[in-house]
Image (cartoon, rainbow, N blue to C red):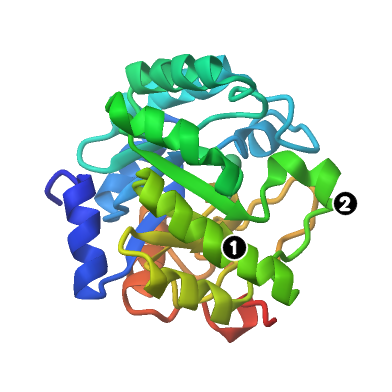
Amino acid sequence: MPAITLTTLQSLKQKGEKIVMLTCYDATFAAAANAAGIEMLLIGDSLGMVLQGHDSTLPVSVGDIAYHTASVKRGNQDALIVADLPFMANASLEQTLLNSAELMRAGAHMVKVEGAGWLAEPIRQLADRGIPTCVHLGLTPQTVNVLGGYKVQGRSEAQARQLRADAIALEQAGAAMLLLECVPSDLAAEISQSVSIPVIGIGAGSGTDGQVLVLHDMLGLSLTGRTPKFVKNFMAGQPSIVEALRAYTQAVKAVTFPAPEHEFSA
Ligand code: KIV
Ligand code: NA
């Protein structure tokens, strides 16, 4: 596949072709994901759970994400690499800028940050300095202690209104991409149509511009024995991991994943 850039993603959205994203934490899986046509690799702070065995993403450091980003970069050829800004790495504006720079130096092409409309100013400052951002909205796992658990977001009319407004404000501030986690499908589809930047979903139905899953989840591996409703095991029936990743790519492109059983309603 040709090297994926922001321009590629923009044109995929315009064409109505779904964007395929997957979390990735090391060089070998990065190469496998490239072979399977995965367009974006996310070094998610989910690594705190799936690699480190923590019960939340809060213990993850910028150094942890940078280490795994550098590893992914070495195995990657063509995918666009996105690295998560972990918990409290954006405690101040200056820290946001410097920590994002560290992730870009490690090999990221874009930084993802959890939050909401209040991120407009840091997003603008990052964009001015050459750092594209993806803003993670909806269920933001770093704020699990405020949210009171891993729950679907945007079900009340007030929450839905806020999400719609935040998406537009963040696009105006210069965000390059949005990611919606655990949001009712109708709302996610509506938000995706209301902005011109790509919107990636996880637990947000098939109406977003693309999909992301956690690698371990979609390979059928689980540390806790619990798998979220929005996950599908793509390893089932496949002869190899590369084939499982390819099945995921094909299902996202064909819009057969996510299916209704992976979605949340309002
Ligand atoms: O950390 C992560 O893997 C993520 C995805 C679930 C979107 O943020
Ligand atoms: Na994350």
Residue 83's spot in the image, x, y percent? Answer: 45, 33
Count of labels in the image? 2
Q: Are marks 2 and 1 in contact (CB under 8 Å)?
A: no
Tell me the residue that label 1 is attached to: 163
Q: Going by the picture, which residue comes out furthest to the left?
A: 2
Q: Is residue 157 above or below residue 53?
A: below
Comparing 124 with 80, the one in front is 124
What is the number of the mark on residue 250? none
Comparing 162 with 114, the one in front is 162
Q: How crowded is the residue under tag 1: few (<14 C-alpha within 10 Å), some, or many (20+)?
A: many
Comparing 56 with 121, the one in front is 121
Residue type for callout 2: Gly
Q: Is residue 6 visible?
A: yes
Comparing 242 with 85, the one in front is 85
Tell me the residue that label 2 is attached to: 148
Q: Name which residue lies at 64% across and 51% down.
A: 221
Secondary element at image label 2: loop
Residue type for callout 1: Leu
Q: Is residue 182 visible?
A: no
Quarter of the picture holding the C terminus: bottom right
Residue 68's spot in the image, x, y percent? Answer: 47, 24
Nearer mark to the viewer, of 2 and 1: 1
Q: Name which residue lies at 79% across and 45% down.
A: 144
Which comes before the other along the chain, label 2 or label 1? 2
Q: Name which residue lies at 40% across and 38% down.
A: 82
